Image (cartoon, helix red, strand yellow):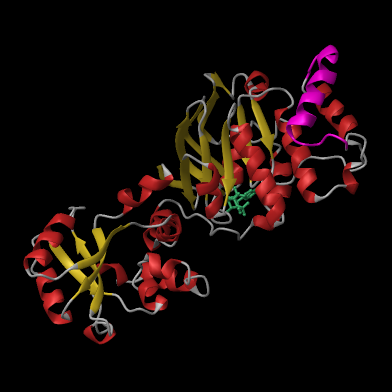
């Protein structure tokens, strides 16, 4: 459906994106995730034909965008970050205007506009002036103009940005519905959006794709260790000694009951996940940026077994070796009952922070011609695009 091959965009002397390479098959809903200035909008504007790549090629359904921009764009519906609306128009007159722009035959326009209005829940407001509508409704009109010509691929740039929580839920539900018969690429920097909508995620950082995979499989690709959290009943020292002596175990960390400690150790257990909201991000950044996951916890940080005689620990192995059975038999042999055992994995938040706070990338960029740091020139973005005259619009 979409082939993006080795695409780079250089803005004057500054890199927008570098060697972006991915494809999408029909029916996928792909989340394009990245911090501000990572290159999401640049990539989407190239895919939709509004910006020419400096290098590389883009094809929609086998049609190269560079050779057949008009035909290729017929297959794409685009909702830019700011929907291209005319506030003085009514919904119907605006959609009629878009239908003309999209060369939809006049005899089909009424039916198509009616279908789209119904699909996006705009019935009863057809004659309302766009200016008088809420942001959520404006976003629906933005989606309506994107699907009016019946495209296969929808490209949505931060479709829920600036909406209130109720509107976010409504727009997500609409996107989910549209995903039933469209292929969708949507950019966001909101992590829950990926879990709520997408079956695949691309993470972009400093103009490069740093990860591509299914949200629930990403943890494995980033983490060589296998971690299991346990609650075991019995004498603390004996438990720790037995676990350290279990074949395959490379580290044992005792968990403090306080949520901050678990987070600082980079681990989110079921117990701590809910309470982790306040200050959790900072703790996660600290935890992921340090050696906290390597199992180097100081003895002084360790908590004693609680008053009921149970110990909570995280046990690690290398090379993703599954140590659950070995741990089970070892503790059973020593008559140390396991009250709970859970395989830990990195959350999408962990993965995102790990990838987008990776110092090594900055070094690569510097060696590779020096990319300007994200956000530094965002104020000049539009004017530079205009000056560059790249747009096919
Ligand atoms: N027209 C432009 N001229 C010069 N530099 C630009 C232009 N557009 C974007 N950039 C730069 O290219 C890089 C990628 O920007 P882009 O807008 O694509 O990122 P983004 O991931 O969409 O960010 P955001 O989430 O803030 O919208 C940034 O460093 C930005 O400053």
Query: Is residue 272 left or right of 304 when viewed as pictured?
Result: right
Most foreground residue, 334 or 159? 334
Let me know if residue 116 is in the magenta part: yes
- Location of residue 88 in the rendering, given as x and y in whole percent from the top left corner: 93, 41
Most foreground residue, 236 or 39? 236
Query: Is residue 77 left or right of 342 when viewed as pictured?
Result: right
Quarter of the image with the C terminus is top right
Q: Quadrant of residue 335?
A: bottom left
Q: Which residues are magenta?
A: 103-124
Is residue 32 visible in this depiction of the protein?
A: yes
Is residue 323 visible in this depiction of the protein?
A: no
Relative to 53, say whether 33 is above or below.
below
Q: Hey, which residue is sitting farthest bottom in the picture?
A: 300
- Location of residue 188 in the rendering, given as x and y in whole percent from the top left corner: 58, 49
Let me know if residue 177 is in the magenta part: no
Relative to 31, say whether 290 is above or below.
below
- Location of residue 387 in the rendering, given as x and y in whole percent from the top left corner: 73, 43
Query: Is residue 39 left or right of 314 when viewed as pictured?
Result: right
Relative to 212, say whether 253 is above or below.
below
Relative to 168, say whether 107 is above or below.
above
> Magenta residues: mostly which secondary structure?
helix
Task: Identify the residue shown where x is 81% and y is 19%.
Answer: 111
Q: Quadrant of residue 315?
A: bottom left
Total number of numbered labels?
Answer: 0
Task: Identify the residue shown where x is 74% and y is 35%.
Answer: 120
């Amino acid at each position: 459906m979409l082939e993006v091959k080795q695409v780079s965009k250089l803005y004057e002397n500054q890199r927008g994106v570098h060697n972006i390479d991915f494809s999408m098959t029909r029916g996928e809903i792909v989340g394009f995730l990245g911090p501000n200035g990572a290159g999401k909008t640049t990539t989407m504007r190239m895919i939709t034909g509004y910006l020419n790549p400096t290098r590389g090629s883009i094809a929609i359904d086998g049609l190269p965008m560079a050779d057949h921009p008009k035909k290729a764009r017929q297959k794409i519906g685009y909702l830019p970050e700011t929907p291209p609306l005319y506030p003085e128009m009514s919904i119907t007159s605006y959609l009629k205007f878009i239908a003309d722009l999209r060369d939809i035959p006049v005899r089909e326009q009424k039916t198509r506009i009616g279908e789209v209005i119904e699909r996006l829940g705009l019935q009863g407001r057809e004659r309302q002036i766009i200016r008088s509508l809420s942001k959520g409704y404006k976003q629906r009109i933005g989606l309506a103009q994107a699907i009016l010509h019946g495209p296969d691929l929808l490209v949505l740039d931060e479709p829920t940005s600036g909406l209130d929580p109720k509107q976010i839920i409504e727009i997500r539900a609409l996107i989910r519905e549209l995903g039933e018969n469209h292929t969708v690429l949507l950019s966001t920097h909101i992590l829950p959006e990926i879990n709520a909508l997408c079956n695949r995620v691309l993470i972009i950082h400093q103009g490069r794709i740093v990860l591509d995979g299914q949200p629930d499989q990403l943890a494995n690709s980033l983490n060589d260790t296998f971690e299991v959290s346990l609650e075991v009943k019995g004498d603390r020292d004996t438990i720790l000694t037995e676990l350290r002596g279990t074949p395959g175990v490379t580290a044992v960390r005792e968990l403090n009951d306080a949520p901050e400690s678990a987070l600082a150790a980079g681990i989110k257990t079921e117990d701590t996940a809910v309470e982790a909201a306040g200050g959790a991000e900072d703790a996660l950044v600290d935890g992921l940026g340090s050696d906290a996951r390597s199992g180097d916890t100081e003895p002084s940080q360790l908590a004693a077994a609680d008053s009921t005689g149970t110990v909570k620990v995280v046990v690690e192995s290398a090379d993703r070796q599954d140590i659950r059975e070995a741990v089970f038999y070892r503790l059973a042999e020593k008559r140390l009952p396991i009250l709970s055992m859970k395989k830990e994995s990195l959350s999408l938040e962990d993965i995102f922070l790990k990838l987008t706070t990776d110092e090594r990338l900055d070094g690569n960029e510097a060696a590779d011609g020096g990319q300007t740091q994200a956000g530094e020139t965002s104020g000049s973005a539009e004017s530079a695009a205009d000056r560059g005259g790249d747009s096919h619009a």
